[in-house]
Amino acid sequence: MTDRKPVADFPRSRLKDDTRSLPIALLRAREAVMAYFRPHHRKGGITEQQWRVIRVLYLEGEMETSRLAERAWLLAPSLSRILKDLEATKYIKRRPGESDSRQSLVSLSPKGTAMVTRVAPFLDGIHQDIARRFGPGRTEQLLALLDQLESALASGPDTRRVVQKEGGRTRK
Amino acid sequence: MTDRKPVADFPRSRLKDDTRSLPIALLRAREAVMAYFRPHHRKGGITEQQWRVIRVLYLEGEMETSRLAERAWLLAPSLSRILKDLEATKYIKRRPGESDSRQSLVSLSPKGTAMVTRVAPFLDGIHQDIARRFGPGRTEQLLALLDQLESALASGPDTRRVVQKEGGRTRK
DNA sequence: ACCATATAATTAACATGTTAAGTTTCGAAG
DNA sequence: CTTCGAAACTTAACATGTTAATTATATGGT
């Protein structure tokens, strides 16, 4: 791979184009999808990431910061800033951990719960709209492939990121 | 939506879980993929976005900023900052437009070209590694679905983002 | 030529991504 | 009880995402 053919025109042809590069293809696809959701998030006065946090708290109830970061797919520093804002706007409540005062337990406030029940139907509608445009079958197929891709790469070169630790968990 | 059934437990069951929400599924998949590429970008001393810019210039040669933003899937403000840095580090060159002095024409410097030919083989190897783990067939299938998804959503609610204008284009 | 409008690019302002460093608290070893 | 390393967060610092506002230049119409 250090010496190929002629010269001057190196691997140029081996560089993946936009439809064959996974990073770019996934970026484009997510961008296309988010174009549908973003306006509605803004209408609710929150960001996409703030919604991810609120959504997890609604689904699973009070939990500590580290677990919340995993569930919302956010890095700890980002979550730290987001929680500060969400607390200031009264969407969440915090209290110190009971057995471990290092951690802080986060939960949804009534205002936060109300926001979910108000916004969720719209988001569900958007998802249905997307599934209708793309086709329900292909949507399911895509979701399955994405899940399988993540599983296939899980044992990769550097698993320790959003999911910091975990030895051999079982989904929960 | 103001009065539903029982109470207290609203659409909770209708909120998509992590494997059925397209935004989250795409986020997770991209995160899993980028975990493989990120270390190599850092090794080259550039960011993922800077690589996207350099890659496009290598593939397509000199072009104006607005076109480069489309090609690299970056928003104009991000690209503006990135170009300032890449120019400072001598990876690119800039000159004013010939017929339109508002625009600035960007091209790869010899140092930038050298960087591509040095890094590209590694990135190609990573892509092959991923395809091997996930399976070549499923990889192709996934890439096809992602491309189809973007097409299906293209006529959506707000096409005017990265691709600012364009009325009825034909790919180019 | 003059002007209103549109366009190319940048700048501004704020939120998040990302890595590293710093703080406080636990827990185990001695 | 003291010390030391790990853990849970938080801060710091810099790059990018995101929307809005600015600046400079083009263009079409009068």
Image: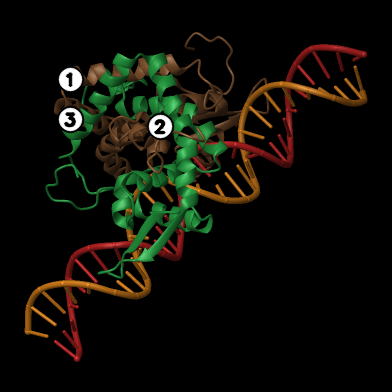
Chain colours: A green, B brown, C orange, D red
Judging from the image, mark 2 belongs to the subunit labelled: B
Q: Which residue is mark 3?
A: B129
Residue at 24 percent of width and 38 percent of height: B36
- Snapshot quadrant of residue C27: bottom left
- What is the number of the mark on residue B52? 2
Q: CA distance from mark 1 to mark 2?
A: 24 Å
Task: Report the amino acid beneath label 1.
Answer: Pro
- Snapshot quadrant of residue A144: top left
Task: Report the amino acid beneath label 2.
Answer: Arg
Q: Is residue A7 visible?
A: no
Task: Report the amino acid beneath label 3.
Answer: Asp
Label 3 and label 1 in one chain: yes
Residue A98 locus on image (x, y percent)? 29, 68
Marked residue nearer the N-terminal end (2 or 3): 2
User: Could you say which is closer to the camera, residue B109 or residue A146?
Assistant: A146
Residue at 31 percent of width and 68 percent of height: A102
Q: Is residue A10 left or right of residue B55?
A: left
Residue at 38 percent of width and 55 percent of height: A107
Q: CA distance from mark 3 to mark 1?
A: 10 Å
Marked residue nearer the N-terminal end (1 or 2): 2
B171 to A112, vertically: above or below: above
1 or 2: mark nearer the eye: 1
3 or 1: mark nearer the eye: 1
- What is the number of the mark on residue A6? none
- What is the number of the mark on residue B136? 1
Residue at 33 percent of width and 22 percent of height: A8
Residue A141 locus on image (x, y percent)? 26, 19
Label 2 and label 3 in one chain: yes
- Snapshot quadrant of residue B15: top left
Mark 2 and mark 3 in contact? Answer it, CB < 8 Å: no
